[in-house]
Image (tube, rainbow, N blue to C red):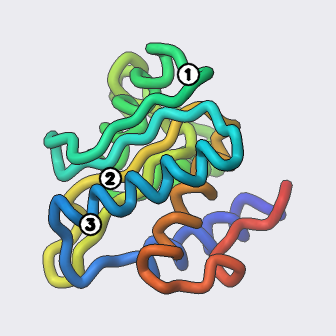
């Protein structure tokens, strides 16, 4: 699949995966679903669900390191800056032959690797992010999309990125 085709699907994901309302209980439900799947599937991931700068759910599973927490911070900063998924942001930059650093952002504070997805509330906009770190970037992104589809009652098969 081409970068343009992936970006078209990511745009569809970002359009479809929006909440009517968002609160701490919704964050907890999303985070615990992701954690349950990660434990069940034996995935070594860090999970972070936040509203702006406020962490609402965090879990670091077996096999992760403090470096995963740093990746989460940097990916979620990218979502907060661009209001787009970190994976989509990275693909858009790659398509243009650019990097975040070339656009004036610090590598120490931002990452364009996949795994962070905007939490968007209808009528309000992006209010936070859900982030995974520990897998390959495309797999991090897809796990987040799968959980959002599950929570929002959307068809994951229709929104899922194809295997590379």
Image quadrant assignment for residue 137: top right
> Could you tell me which residue is drawn at 61 percent across and 21 percent down?
63
- Closest to the observer, 163 or 4: 163
Spatial CA distance of label 1 from label 2 is 20 Å
Mark closest to the chain's N terminus, 1 or 2? 1
Mark closest to the chain's N terminus, 3 or 1? 3
Image quadrant assignment for residue 6: bottom right
Find residue 90 and report its horizontal and vertical position in percent: 55, 45
Spatial CA distance of label 2 from label 3 is 12 Å
- Closest to the observer, 146 or 8: 146
Find residue 103 and report its horizontal and vertical position in percent: 40, 34
Find residue 66 and report its horizontal and vertical position in percent: 44, 14
Give the label, 2 or 3, closer to the camera: 3
Q: Secondary structure at mark 2?
A: strand
- Closest to the observer, 49 or 94: 49
Pointer 1 residue: 64
Q: Quadrant of the N terminus?
A: bottom right
Q: In the figure, is residue 55 to the left or right of 36?
A: left
- Neighbor class of circle 1 (other Cα within 10 Å; few <14, some 14-19, many 20+) is some
- Neighbor class of circle 2 (other Cα within 10 Å; few <14, some 14-19, many 20+) is many
Which circle marks residue 26 in the picture? 3
Spatial CA distance of label 3 from label 1 is 25 Å
Pointer 2 residue: 129
Q: Residue 89: in sight, yes or no?
A: no
> Could you tell me which residue is drawn at 43 percent across and 45 percent down?
131
Mark closest to the chain's N terminus, 2 or 3? 3
């Amino acid at each position: 699949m081409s970068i343009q085709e992936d970006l078209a699907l990511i745009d569809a994901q970002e359009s479809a995966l929006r909440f009517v309302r968002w609160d701490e209980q919704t964050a907890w439900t999303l985070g615990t679903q992701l954690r349950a799947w990660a434990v069940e599937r034996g995935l070594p991931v860090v999970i972070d669900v936040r509203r702006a700068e406020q962490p609402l759910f965090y879990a670091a599973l077996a096999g992760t390191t403090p470096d995963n927490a740093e990746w989460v911070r940097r990916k979620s900063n990218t979502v907060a800056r661009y209001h787009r998924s970190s994976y989509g942001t990275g693909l858009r930059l790659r398509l243009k032959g650019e990097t975040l650093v070339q656009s004036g952002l610090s590598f120490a504070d931002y990452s364009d690797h996949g795994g962070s997805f905007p939490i968007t509330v209808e009528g309000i906009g992006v209010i936070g992010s859900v982030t995974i770190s520990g897998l390959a970037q495309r797999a991090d992104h897809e796990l987040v999309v799968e959980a959002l589809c599950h929570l929002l009652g959307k068809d994951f098969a229709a929104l899922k990125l194809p295997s590379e």
